[in-house]
Image (cartoon, rainbow, N blue to C red):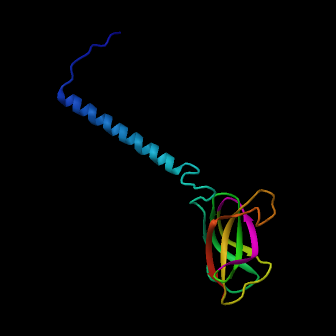
């Protein structure tokens, strides 16, 4: 079967050029959209933009309620007391799996006191099922604060 080559009119060239440009733009848009939603997109080192914590001021006690968490990996949720305007002693830690969590309780070794500020930080998990602040390090000092009342 043979194809004959015919000369294209200016209108046909314009229509084909326009279709080609549209196809290229659609392809680029799909490629960019897929890269932006790919796992790990936007990660910088060990911190993922998908980690978030919501903790509110709460009644002093032997535990801390973390309202909402979104974790990109299995991480430790760690509560610190404030000392001289910075993180002080660790009061408690709880490991949670990747995903979204609501109303999670972190049991403390020592209770919070009314009027004091506390920090919640996310720490990496080294996989041994035991929290060790020398091995399970914070995610680049990203902290969330709350007050006990």
Kindly indicate the quadrant of the structure image that contains residue 2. Answer: top left
Q: Where, quadrant-wise, is the N terminus in this rendering?
A: top left
- Would residue 4 appear left or right of 29 to someone viewing this image? left
Q: Nearer the viewer, residue 141 or 128?
A: 141
| Above or below, 50 relative to 22 | below
Q: Nearer the viewer, residue 32 or 123?
A: 123
| Above or below, 113 relative to 13 | below
Q: Is residue 82 visible?
A: yes
Residue 45: x, y in percent?
61, 55
Magenta stretch: residue 78 in it?
no
Query: Furthest residue to the front?
Result: 84
Task: Give the main secondary structure of the magenta stretch.
Answer: strand
| Above or below, 137 relative to 7 | below
Residue drawn at x 27%, y 31% as measured from the top left: 16
Residue drawn at x 58%, y 50% as measured from the top left: 39
- Would residue 81 appear left or right of 21 to someone viewing this image? right
Kindly indicate the quadrant of the structure image that contains residue 94. Answer: bottom right
User: In this picture, which residue range is highlighted in magenta?
Assistant: 86-99
Residue 26: x, y in percent?
38, 42
Residue 6: x, y in percent?
23, 17
Query: Furthest residue to the left?
Result: 10
Residue drawn at x 62%, y 72% as measured from the top left: 143
Q: Nearer the viewer, residue 47 or 23?
A: 47
Q: Where, quadrant-wise, is the C terminus in this rendering?
A: bottom right
Kindly indicate the quadrant of the structure image that contains residue 115. Answer: bottom right
Q: How many marks?
A: 0
Residue 122: x, y in percent?
67, 66
Q: Is residue 55 visible?
A: no
């Amino acid at each position: 079967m043979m194809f004959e080559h015919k000369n294209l009119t200016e209108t046909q060239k314009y229509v084909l050029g326009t279709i080609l440009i549209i196809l290229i733009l659609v392809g680029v848009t799909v490629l960019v959209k897929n890269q932006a939603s790919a796992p790990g997109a936007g990660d910088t080192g060990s911190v993922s933009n998908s980690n978030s914590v919501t903790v509110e001021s709460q009644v002093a006690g032997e535990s801390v309620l973390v309202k909402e968490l979104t974790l990109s990996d299995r991480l430790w949720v760690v509560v610190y007391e404030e000392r001289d305007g910075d993180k002080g002693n660790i009061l408690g830690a709880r490991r949670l799996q990747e995903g979204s969590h609501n109303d999670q309780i972190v049991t403390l070794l020592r209770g919070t006191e009314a009027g004091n500020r506390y920090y919640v930080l996310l720490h990496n998990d080294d996989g041994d099922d035991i929290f060790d602040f020398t091995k399970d390090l914070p995610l680049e000092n990203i902290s969330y604060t709350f007050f006990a009342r």
